[in-house]
Image: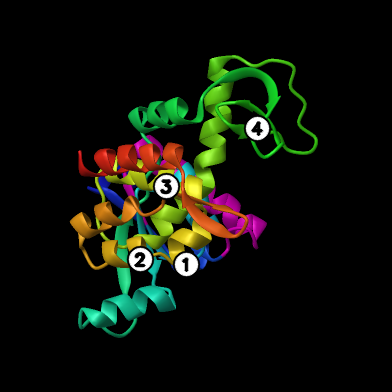
Amino acid sequence: YLEWFPLDKLKIDRSCVTAIGHDARKTALLEAMLLLAEKLGLHVVAEGVEDPSQVAFLAQRGCEYLQLIMTRRVKILLAMLGITGVVYVVTKARTVSQNGLNYLKGEEGWSAKPYYDDAGIPTIGYGHRIKPGEHFVSITPTEGEALLRSDLQWAEVAVNSLVIVPLNQNQFDALVDVVYNIGEGAFAASTLLGVLNVGEYAGAAAQILRWDKIHVDGVAQVNAGLQARRAKDQQLFLA
């Protein structure tokens, strides 16, 4: 009888979301529901998402919209706008586009064989740092792209989780590159995020340029390579 109903959306209850990673049976049922929604062409909204691992799980399985439970930081920003109480925001879970991926590939550079980067860390492909237990002799560009996509997941989750205002694909891709470069913690505490989350897109674009420094003997110094990369990030953000 399911096909008789004019359904176009499926809403996942918070009790299912909180079970992710904790209750194997409920997690399996959730995966089955997401697969069913995909086969039936239904849009999916997940309720009560509050953890980056939940964002990753849902986004990787085609959940388009997440109702985020606000963190203390976000509630403070919303209070500045006169919005108080328990707040839920619906946002689209994104991943980096092929255009954004191609941009990152160009910035990271390519090596089919392992090498040591400037920090002395074994690396291969498009800047993939080889983890303990990984062994590579040579890889193809297709394999390198798959490694890069995997490496970017935590940065995608960070942007999806921390940004509470709408983003277009170029803005998302640019921010993922920034976060991938500076780290989730630095982004979460940044003026860039604070300005962006009150809707000041131009101000956020200007803030991107500030992340162009490295520390040498404890002193922050402008790095020409980072300066050029941030300028490209800003250009992509504003495109």
Dot 2 or dot 3: first in sequence order is 3
Q: Which segment is the magenta one?
A: 19-45
Q: CA distance from mark 2 to mark 1?
A: 22 Å
User: x, y percentage for residue 117?
Assistant: 65, 32
- 206, above or below 131, in the image: below
Asked which quadrant contains residue 168, the reply is top left
The residue nearer to you, when weighing 153 against 56, is 153
- Between circles 1 and 4, the one closer to the viewer is 4
Mark 4 secondary-structure assignment:
loop
Q: Secondary structure at mark 2?
A: helix
Between the residue at mark 4 and the residue at mark 2, the CA separation in whole angstroms equals 30 Å
Residue 50: give its label. 1
Residue at 32%, 37% in the rendered image: 232
User: Position of 71 compared to 111: left or right?
Assistant: left
Residue hosting label 4: 117
Tell me which corner region of the image, top left, top right, bottom left or bottom right, holds residue 21: bottom right
Three-letter amino acid code at the position of disc 2: Thr
Decide whether residue 30 is among the magenta residues.
Answer: yes
Residue, disc 3: 178
Q: Are marks 2 and 3 in contact (CB under 8 Å)?
A: no
In contact (CB < 8 Å): disc 1 and disc 4? no
Q: Point out residue 176 in the picture as x, y percentages from the top left corner.
A: 41, 45
* CB atoms of marks 4 and 2 within 8 Å: no
Residue 175 forms part of the magenta stretch: no
